[in-house]
Amino acid sequence: MTIQPRDLFCSANEEATPLICLERGEFEDWRASQGEVTKAWLEVRRIKATRQAPLWLPGETAEEPASVLIIAKPGEGFAALARAAKSLPEGDFELCGNPPDLEAALLGWALAGYRFDRYKTKSKREQGARPRLIAPREADLERVIAIASAIWLARDLINTPASDMLPSAMSAIAKQVAKDCGSGFKETVGDDLLDAGFGAIHAVGRASADPPRLVDLTWGDPDHPKLTLVGKGVCFDSGGLDIKTAQGMKLMKKDMGGAAVALALGALVMRRALPVRLRVLLPTVENAISGNAYRPGDILKTYKGITVEIGNTDAEGRLVLCDALALACEESPHLLLDFATLTGAARIALGTSLPAMFASSNALSNDLCESGQAVEDPVWPLPLHKPYEWQLKSKVADINNAGYGPYNGAIYAALFLQKFVEENIDWAHFDMMAWNTQARPGYPVGGDTPSLQAVFRYLEQRFSP
């Protein structure tokens, strides 16, 4: 049976082991309040407030462990419970002593329980043996589980190799999400993309044996504010005829990370029933090489009618996004957000764990940054710097998909996308890695969802009553 975040929590029961959570500044007062057995036990072992690993505490006789102590740095309940979830054995634990941000701490517990073990010969622990937590009644546990479930979904999508996550497979998962959440679903596949005007999506994906497609989910009351999410779904990126190196291609199963985040965020919006008219657009392709692959120098006609000269077939993400963004703008959404593993330049500027964000207004940018800081999911604003627009010029088409020279690649890509977004629409673009290169509590090496929590908090504040 596949473990889900809900399975990491349980109801109160007499056999549960107390899990005492303290901040460092509370440790001395707590120790002073303990019985002589516990005081002596702590003294002999020289336990300090700086300890990070969970500590089993003795009962009245010191012969059997009776409870577990975890000590958090100020404001770091998330990391403390994530470490505990990772190291504690199977069994039920009852959280005693609430961390400052209780729901963040519970989310740490839930995210630490994630494993990507689909292709492993399973051990007992990997088969489902996990510690379970009894959350305090005042916590909004359903919200925690919904956020964790969305992140687990996106992680699974990103971690799955392209052999099992090409456009048809990703479409099937989106269709199942639509069914589970009660949303509408349709897709445009293969040469039908040309008939519908999506020339850029078709060109990028036509060389693959698995046809390109545009997945379209709709949900909610048509009278509610329109929210549209767009995600880059390049299920594998060889670079096309401008082929990547072997090292550059190694992680390209994650190049659909933007689509994974958009789909997971859409599922979260639906499951939490935010009062919006939601649309999720996932242009989903494999950038492969064959006799009919698109070429440098080709000129594509996009859905908006703008012609694009191909300066580099490895700048394909902005091509699939531009058709979807133009389609999204036809119904003038109140808010349009796109997510993409778009440029190496953003990684060079900000590193692997901090996504670049471009927004159509300072107010939107500031609000998204504030939300990210509040939930420890930071995003960082970069400018839509108009003087760089000269790099979009082409001598033979309206614009070029690759700039001139090695500089400002992330800004160039964002300016390219802005050409397909109507000026009167609130729009933000997130350029992310979607992959953890270094493990930290709650975040294993592998698929990641930067900006998902930040954006969801913003959506709750903007659209909830």
Image (spheres, grey):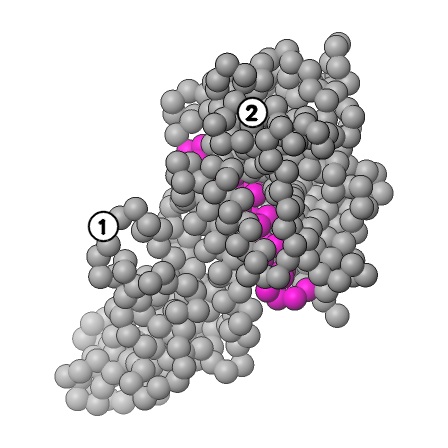
Say whether residue 85 is visible: yes
Quadrant where the image shows the C terminus: bottom right
Q: Residue at x 75, y 10 (%)?
A: 396
Reading the image, the residue beneath label 1 is 121
Q: Amino acid at mark 2?
A: Arg
Relative image position of residue 261 (x, y in whole percent): 55, 48
Vertical side of 360 occupied by 143: above or below: below
Q: CA distance from mark 2 to mark 1?
A: 36 Å
Q: Secondary structure at mark 2?
A: loop
Secondary element at image label 1: loop
Q: Which mark is residue 82?
A: none
**For residue 244: magenta?**
no
Q: Which residue carries the number 2 mark?
A: 206
Which residue is nearer to you in this view: 282 or 45? 282
Report which quarter residue 392 is drawn in: top right
Residue 456 at what x, y percent from top left? 62, 58
The stretch in magenta equals 251-274
Q: Main secondary structure of the magenta part?
A: helix
